[in-house]
């Protein structure tokens, strides 16, 4: 018995030694296998599909996270039977030993645990007999021990990189990677369900909350970056669209403003060559630029011919510094002035540039059809700058050289027509403006034809052309005539025959070779515009000479017929001043116009023959201003009012603001518009501002700012006031004085 007792500890010691040696050899083998597994894992991991593991039974899932040593009991720890509770501390020690990778620590922990925990190891395996154990059982135990050592190592590497499903020993089974040899062996024989497993919560709530929040933060960040990317792309795309639209609207890049030479000379180009202008009052003036071929020799009594060939142009740069002479004409004092080769124009512009073109105002001025041009219609350099407009003043033919109409002249030209040469000059100047004004900072789409006196008559006649908008967009006519040609060209032949007899010419060649001054001076006295006064008792309006004719080329019908049909192609403003008929001849006919002289003068006129003296003296003041208003109403204002009443889209104005001698003379509106005088009183300054505002708003926008919705007359005084009618015009229309005695030019 004693020997048996003595042999039993020795047997146990031998078994322990054998186990330790086996364990060391197994650890060495496992270390080699671990290295092999790592190498094999690198190759296999590339072929593994990256997908999440399927859910396992409740309580059996092991999340791949870093497990602090001693901080958690994995499911393998919790599957032991109640009889093994006393080995809990030993199991924890064994788990710690298995996690440690240092070889020396493993050996120390293994030897110490083997000495202390041997009974626990052999108590688990009930079928093992130490004395009579068979070799098969030992081999099974060794395989189980190898498996238990292998499983924690695989579990540890699983947290670093997920192995393929075929090699992962714990993913699908929900088994813990870190466990002792005893707990793993117990689990294989344990029938307990997962619901009975003991879960020990760890103090990693913060870590779990962070992991739960990670997907939300991740997706929120992705969405934010996605929105920023889309927003940036849309902003860039929108910027590209805006740039393309701006470039398409602006057209080609404008040329820079040419530099000044010697501080005052500037150069630009035209369709016929370069021209050089000079600075005047902070603006640039180009004077004497040819716009048509000289109307001399064979071109006399022909419509204006364009400069459409190189031989008609100039070489080098044209020095457009000084004004050229006007066309041949007769002034009011019967003086002859001007030259025949006169078809040039002057341009005054605040800028010589191609961007932001400015409205263009073409000045057409003449006291009558035989002379007095340009009169007050001269461009103002100061107002070109202050009002941002471009002024153009062309010369045009007057008198016999500008309006003579004869059969012999018609037969020498094709198409067979004659007369209205002065109108053709204005049209050719407008064509030149359409082609070249862009080089002077002007806008060819915004051209206003501005006429005064006889020039206003020409402007309103041109406004009735069917193709007028091809040349200009709007027109302003001040104190013009309202009697237009009602006779065909052949009906005027008798009148012009008298002119031929006076100059002793009977063919076109003679007319083209005669001295131009002789042609001008030979005009009959009855063709010269008379000074305005009350209609004489014996006055016959039908015998007055009409310079304009219906030539079939420029004027194809009577302008009054166009007005009646209300078919104007351009915007039109017509007007006058309240005493436009004022003249020195009438004013100084008597030193002092008394009431008696006023009444007597009225009674001796055609008004007296109609027994209207009493009515008229009751309507007008018995002084010179009243007399001047009476003459103006019959000759100018009321005939224009009659034309305006036939049209719906035309504006009509009358200026009442007086200047010297309490008279609103015929130049009052022109002087205010072009700044020809300085206002001296507050009333004059207000009128000055009102008149300029009315005109330049029309030039810029094509409409009158103060125009009422209803058809009204604009009374321009210190302010612009609309009125339903004007003074006594309806009375004179009813009495058949208007338009019967209207002025021709």
Image (cartoon, grey):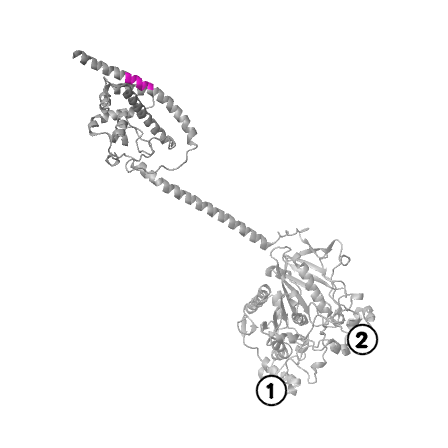
Q: Is residue 78 magenta?
A: no
Q: Image quadrant for the N terminus?
A: top left
Residue 34 x/y as whole percent: 37, 24
Give the left or right position of residue 547, taking residue 575 as reference: right
Which secondary structure is most common in the magenta stretch?
Answer: helix
Region in magenta: 18-25
Is residue 20 in the magenta section? yes
Task: Assess whether mark 1 and mark 2 are in contact (beta carbons under 8 angstroms).
Answer: no
Q: Residue furthest top?
A: 3
Label located before the other in sequence (2 or 1): 2
Image quarter (top left, top right, bottom left or bottom right) of the C terminus: bottom right
Q: CA distance from mark 2 to mark 1?
A: 47 Å
Residue identified by numbered label 1: 614
Question: Quarter of the image holding residue 284?
Answer: bottom right
Q: Residues within 10 Å of mark 1 (few under 14, many from 20)?
A: few
Instruction: Name the residue beneath numbered marker 2.
Output: 500
Q: Is residue 581 visible?
A: no
Residue 438 placed where, x, y %? 65, 58
SS state under label 1 = helix
The answer to whether residue 538 is above or below residue 144 is: below
> Residue at horizontal 40%, vertical 26%?
38
Q: Which is in the foreground here, disc 2 or disc 1?
A: 2
Q: In the image, is residue 16 above or below residue 58?
A: above
């Amino acid at each position: 018995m004693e020997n048996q007792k003595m042999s039993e500890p020795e047997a146990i010691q031998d078994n322990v030694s054998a186990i330790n040696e086996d364990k060391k050899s197994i650890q060495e083998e496992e270390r080699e296998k671990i290295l092999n597994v790592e190498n094999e894992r690198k190759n296999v991991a590339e072929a593994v599909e990256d997908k999440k593991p399927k859910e396992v039974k409740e309580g059996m899932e092991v999340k791949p996270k870093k497990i602090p040593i001693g901080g958690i009991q994995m499911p393998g720890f919790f599957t032991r039977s109640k009889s093994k509770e006393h080995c809990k501390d030993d199991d924890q020690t064994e788990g710690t030993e298995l996690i440690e990778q240092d070889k020396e620590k493993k050996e120390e922990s293994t030897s110490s645990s083997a000495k202390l925990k041997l009974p626990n190891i052999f108590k688990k395996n009930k079928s093992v007999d130490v004395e009579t154990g068979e070799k098969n059982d030992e081999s099974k135990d060794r395989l189980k021990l190898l498996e238990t050592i292998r499983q924690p190592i695989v579990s540890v590497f699983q947290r670093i990189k997920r192995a393929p499903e075929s090699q992962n020993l714990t993913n699908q089974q929900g088994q813990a990677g870190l466990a002792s040899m005893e707990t793993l062996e117990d689990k294989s024989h344990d029938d307990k369900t997962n619901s009975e497993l003991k879960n020990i919560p760890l103090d990693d709530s913060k870590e779990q909350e962070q992991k739960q929040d990670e997907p939300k933060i991740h997706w929120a960040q992705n969405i934010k970056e996605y929105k920023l990317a889309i927003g940036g792309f849309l902003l860039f795309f929108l910027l590209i669209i805006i740039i393309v639209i701006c470039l398409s609207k602006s057209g080609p890049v404008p040329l820079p403003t040419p530099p000044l030479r010697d501080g005052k000379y500037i150069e630009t180009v035209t369709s016929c060559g370069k021209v050089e202008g000079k600075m005047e009052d902070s603006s640039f003036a180009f004077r004497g630029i040819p716009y048509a071929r000289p109307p001399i020799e064979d071109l006399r009594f022909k419509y204006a011919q364009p400069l459409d060939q190189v031989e008609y142009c100039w070489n080098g740069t044209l020095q457009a510094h000084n004004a050229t002479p006007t066309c041949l004409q007769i002034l009011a004092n019967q003086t002859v002035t001007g030259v025949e080769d006169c078809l040039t124009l002057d341009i005054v512009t605040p800028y010589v540039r191609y961007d932001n073109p400015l409205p263009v105002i073409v000045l057409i001025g003449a006291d009558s059809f035989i002379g007095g041009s340009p009169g007050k219609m001269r461009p103002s350099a100061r107002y070109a700058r202050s009002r941002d407009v471009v002024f153009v003043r062309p010369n045009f033919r007057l008198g016999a050289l500008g309006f003579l109409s004869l059969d012999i002249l018609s037969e020498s030209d094709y198409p067979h027509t004659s007369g209205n040469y002065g109108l053709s000059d204005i049209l050719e100047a407008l064509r030149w403006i359409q082609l070249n004004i862009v080089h002077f900072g002007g806008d060819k789409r915004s051209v206003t034809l501005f006429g005064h006196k006889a020039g206003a008559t020409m402007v309103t006649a041109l406004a009735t052309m069917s193709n007028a908008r091809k040349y200009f967009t709007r027109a302003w006519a001040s104190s013009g005539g309202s009697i237009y040609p009602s006779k065909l060209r052949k009906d005027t032949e008798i009148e012009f025959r008298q002119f031929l007899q006076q100059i002793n010419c009977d063919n076109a060649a003679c007319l083209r070779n005669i001295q131009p001054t002789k042609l001008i001076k030979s005009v009959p006295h009855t063709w010269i515009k008379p000074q305005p006064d009350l209609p004489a008792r014996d006055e016959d309006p039908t015998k007055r000479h009409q310079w304009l004719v219906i030539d079939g080329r420029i004027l194809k019908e009577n302008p009054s017929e166009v007005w009646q049909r209300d078919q104007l192609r351009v915007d039109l403003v017509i007007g006058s001043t309240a005493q436009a008929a004022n003249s020195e001849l009438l004013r100084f006919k008597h030193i002092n116009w008394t009431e008696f002289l006023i009444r007597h003068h009225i009674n001796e006129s055609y008004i007296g023959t109609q027994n209207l003296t009493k009515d008229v003296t009751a309507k007008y003041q018995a002084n010179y201003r009243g007399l001047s208003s009476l003459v103006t109403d019959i000759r100018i204002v009321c005939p224009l009012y009659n034309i305006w009443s036939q049209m719906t889209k035309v504006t009509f104005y009358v200026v009442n603001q007086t200047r010297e001698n309490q008279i609103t003379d015929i130049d009052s509106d022109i002087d205010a518009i072009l700044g020809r005088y300085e206002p001296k009183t507050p009333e004059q300054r207000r009128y000055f501002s009102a008149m300029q505002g009315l005109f330049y708003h029309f030039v810029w926008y094509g409409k009158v700012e103060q125009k009422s919705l209803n058809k009204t007359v604009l009374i321009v005084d210190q302010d612009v006031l609309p009125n339903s009618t004007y003074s006594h015009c309806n009375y004179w229309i009813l009495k058949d004085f208007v338009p019967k005695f209207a002025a021709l030019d």
